[in-house]
Amino acid sequence: MDAHSPTWIAAQLGGFVALGFIIAAFASRQDDRLLLYLIFANVAFAVHFLLFGEAVAAGMSGLVVVRIWLARRFPRRQPLMWLVLIATVAVAVATWHSWYDIFPLLAAVFGTLAMFLLRGLPMRVLLAGVALCWLANALIIGSIGGFIAELLALGTNLVTMWRIHCAKRRPESG
């Protein structure tokens, strides 16, 4: 894609829109709010990746929206988790075009495990791994907004994880 073409600029703007939602998501200590903002971020990322011509990444982002909704509505339902994992692999296989499509696939798999099996701090630890996968993808495809979004997602998530850890260590007053 030609840098500075209208499509390239629109793709980059989509990444910056997602960035705003990512910051809001990982700054929240409430799991429900985290997941809601992640839904909005992934809609923006799906459009972002479509504009970049990255079908696997766009498909994974679209599935993330469904996965988050299912995980919120039916927490810890492993049969649903397995269906989401099967759909994730099927979409990746159907749209695969390059070796680096492994990063969105890994991000989607790790995210599915985090959303269905974990809560609180353990969920955020696995989501940090998800951010690392998306960060690698953003670097490879040249997504400025995606790179900044994932770098900030990772940093914000790490700070929030530290805040949660410190809050658990404080003695209760009263």
Image (tube, rainbow, N blue to C red):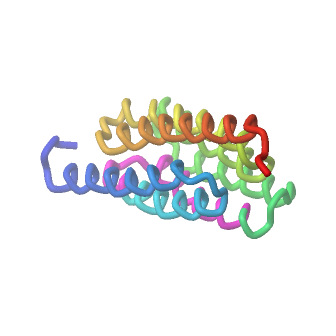
Image location of residue 162, percent across then percent down: 61, 34
Residue at the location (61% across, 59% down)? 35
Image location of residue 159, percent across then percent down: 54, 36
Front residue of this view, candidates 52 and 22:
22
Classify 133 as above or below 123: above
Classify 80 as above or below 86: below
Classify 139 as above or below 53: above
Quadrant assignment for the N terminus: top left
Q: Which stretch did the figure color magenta?
A: 48-71
Residue at the location (51% across, 49% down)? 27
Front residue of this view, candidates 71 and 140:
71
Q: How many marks?
A: 0
The reply, left or right, for residue 108 in relation to residue 153 is right
Question: Going by the picture, which residue comes out furthest to the front?
Answer: 174
Residue at the location (59% across, 36% down)? 128
Residue at the location (34% across, 57% down)? 17
The reply, left or right, for residue 27 in relation to residue 70 is left
Residue 62 is one of the magenta-drawn residues = yes
Image location of residue 152, percent across then percent down: 42, 39
Whether residue 106 appears in this view of the structure is: no
Image location of residue 38, percent across then percent down: 54, 57
